[in-house]
Each structure stands twice: as structure tokens, then as C-alpha cells.
Image: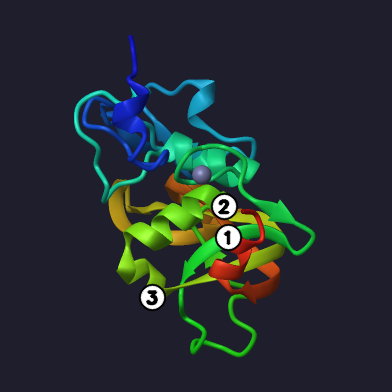
Amino acid sequence: MTVAPIRTGTVPYIAPWSGEAASAASVTGTAAGGVAFVFESPQDRDSFGVLWNSRGDARGEGEPEYANVHPQRQREVMQELLCQVCGGRADQDDRGALWLLEDNRADWHGWPNDLLTTHPPVCLPCAGQAARGCPHLRRGSVAVRVGSSEVCAVYGRRYALVGRRLIRGDYDVVSYTSPNVRWVVAGQLVRSLADCTIVDLQAELGGRT
Ligand SMILES: [Zn+2]
């Protein structure tokens, strides 16, 4: 299969495409406590043993689904600290990796330290492009250098056994240290942010040109 770079160039790396079939795997409860796929393979679980939703791998096929996130690509970029837009290395300097976050500074003193986020970091060229191309982003977001961050949780659909019936619950962030994580089909990886410095994006961009 040939994937034309010109088609994927403006579509975020973590966006799924309509040609990437969503998994139709049936979910079941296990005797040991937790969820499993009826026909499960080892790659359906991450290194913590958590079950993951999956989609086909055919980036550029069909139409992009901007409102959705490709589980495996989001997990890859979040795990490796790659740019969510282009899939290259996220920008790093001595203050840490560059993140563009929705500006919620009013939420708590010291925000975004201790923030749990599913949004991966970005590289400098993509941050600049996003800021130029999207006035809303420029107004509503803040650039942050994150000195340390940790993969700590997944975002996914929770399940529960009621009697012998498996009930589909809501989407939630569930920590890897919680026993409830065995009852989740994960869709996105979550990092907790620490050692954060809010920076001026224009200054960051100016520093590299
Ligand atoms: Zn990028």
C-alpha cells in the first residue's frame, strides 16, 4: 500500500483514518477478574497487562477522523514523547518537552503540575504551524515546558460484572496502580506532568529561527 505524504501532511499523526477499521473484538469478563477479548492475541495488551482497543494501520487511507484518536499511534507518541502532529521527536530543551495545553491556569495554583493528560507533546515547527493556523488555539492554549512526566494511567471504557453480566460503563482515566485497570479497554495513554514551566510560544519559536 502506498501512503501519499501530501495527504497525511496536514492531518495529525494521532488522527485515525476511515480506512483504518475499528476493532470488532468482543469483550468478555474473566474468571480471574477483568476484561479480555474473546479472541485475544498478546499484542492486545500493553507491558502492564492492560487490554487495548485497536484499529487498522493504514494511515492516509480514506478520510481523516479529526475528532477521534488512533489508539496505537497515540500510545506510541505518548510513550516515546513524539509530536502528536507529525510523529517526529517532540521539542526538548533544558526545561523539558514542549506541550501545548488548553489554558486552565485558573484550575489550581501551580497548574499544570500534577495534570493528567492524554494530549501528547509537540515539536516546534508543528507548534508554530498550529498557532498560526488556528486563532482559537492561540487564544485558548498555553505553551508549557514539562521537565518530567510519567506514564501513569490509561483513558478508556470501563466495564463491570453485575451478576454474570458484563456491563459497559463510561470512559474514564484509570491509574495503572488501580485494580480497576483490569476492567478497562484502553484507548489512550495518560501522562502526569511535573516540573512545568509556562513559556511564551512566540519566544520559543523565535529562539529557533
Ligand atoms: Zn511535529
Q: Residue at x 52, y 24 (%)?
A: 43
User: What is the CA distance from the residue labelled 2 to the residue labelled 1?
Assistant: 7 Å
Above or below for 48 versus 111: above
Residue 33 in view (yes/no): no
Farthest residue toward the top?
Answer: 1
Q: Residue at x 26, y 51 (%)?
A: 67
Task: Residue 163: give its label.
Answer: none
Q: Position of residue 149 (x, y in %)?
A: 69, 59
Tag 1: amino acid = Leu
Mark 2, other Cα within 10 Å: few <14 / some 14–19 / many ≥20: many
Q: Position of residue 54 (x, y in %)?
A: 38, 32
Above or below for 70 versus 190: above
Instruction: State left or right for residue 188 relative to residue 202.
Output: left
Question: Are the residues flagged by discs 2 and 1 in contact, CB closer than 8 Å?
Answer: yes
Q: Residue at x 38, y 21 (%)?
A: 39
Q: Residue at x 33, y 36 (%)?
A: 27
Instruction: State left or right for residue 181 relative to residue 148.
Output: left
Task: Residue 124: give its label.
Answer: 2
Q: Label 1, secondary structure: give it.
A: helix
Residue 198 in view (yes/no): yes
Question: Closest to the observer: 145 or 134?
Answer: 134
Q: Label 2, secondary structure: give it.
A: helix
Residue linked to disc 1: 205
User: What is the CA distance from the residue labelled 2 to the residue labelled 3?
Assistant: 18 Å
Mark 3, other Cα within 10 Å: few <14 / some 14–19 / many ≥20: few
Above or below for 89 versus 178: above
Q: Earlier in the sequence, mark 2 or mark 1?
A: 2
Disc 2 residue lies near ligand 1 with CB under 8 A? yes
Q: Position of residue 77 (x, y in %)?
A: 55, 41
Tag 3: amino acid = Gly
Residue linked to disc 3: 140
